[in-house]
Amino acid sequence: MTDPLRAKIEKLRIMRESASRRSGLYADMGKLDDKKTSQSLGALNRASAPGKKMQKLGFLMLWIPEPTGVTVAVGAPMILAGRYLDKKYNGSTLKDIGSSTHETISSINQFKASL
């Protein structure tokens, strides 16, 4: 019969190895000198979030005073569409992915050190 604590530790060790491999891969990808690869990575570094922009425009249109109410009729659907795009489109950059991986590695290491 296996000890549940040992099973959890093994699972955490596997997760730590995976996260460290992933962060090493991202670091190696950043060192590539190919022009097209660097353009692709640059696009990842400057990823836009169209949902947030659409929400801002929708709020702007919603609060613009206009007697006919056309901007209110257009602003509300823009806000909803922006929220939908925000959920469906991931605007995270390569830096976000790297920092998330780094946080995961450090939390796994902290947990391991506490045992």
Image (cartoon, grey):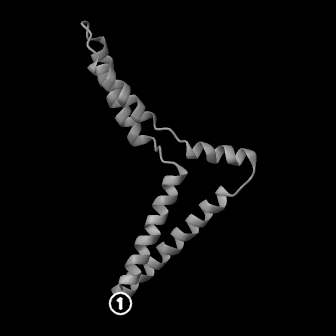
Residue beneath the point at 37% across and 36% down? 84
Q: In this view, does 102 lie to the left or right of 44?
A: left
The amino acid type of the residue labelled 1 equals Asp
Using the image, determine if residue 81 lies above or below residue 90: above
Quarter of the rendering containing residue 53: top left
In percent of width and height, residue 26 lies at: 60, 60
Q: What percent of the width, then of the height, locates residue 54?
A: 40, 29
What residue is at 44 percent from the left and 65 percent from the top?
103
Q: Looking at the image, can residue 77 be seen?
A: no
Q: In which quarter of the image is the N terminus?
A: bottom left
Pick out the residue farthest to the right: 34
Residue visible at 47% across and 43% down in the picture: 91
Residue nearest the viewer, comparing 76 with 26: 26
Residue 48 vs 61, above or below: the answer is below
Local secondary structure at mark 1: loop
Q: Is 80 on the left-hand or right-hand side of 33?
A: left
Residue 41 at x, y = what percent? Answer: 63, 48
Q: Give the image quarter of residue 89.
A: top left
Q: Which residue lies furthest to the top in this view?
A: 68
Name above or below for residue 17 compared with residue 56.
below
User: Residue 115 location in percent, x, y?
Assistant: 36, 86
Question: Which residue does the numbered mark 1 point to in the structure image?
Answer: 3
- At horizontal 39% and vertical 35% (from top left) the residue drawn is 52
Residue 60 visible to an observer of this rendering? yes
Residue 61 sits in which quadrant?
top left
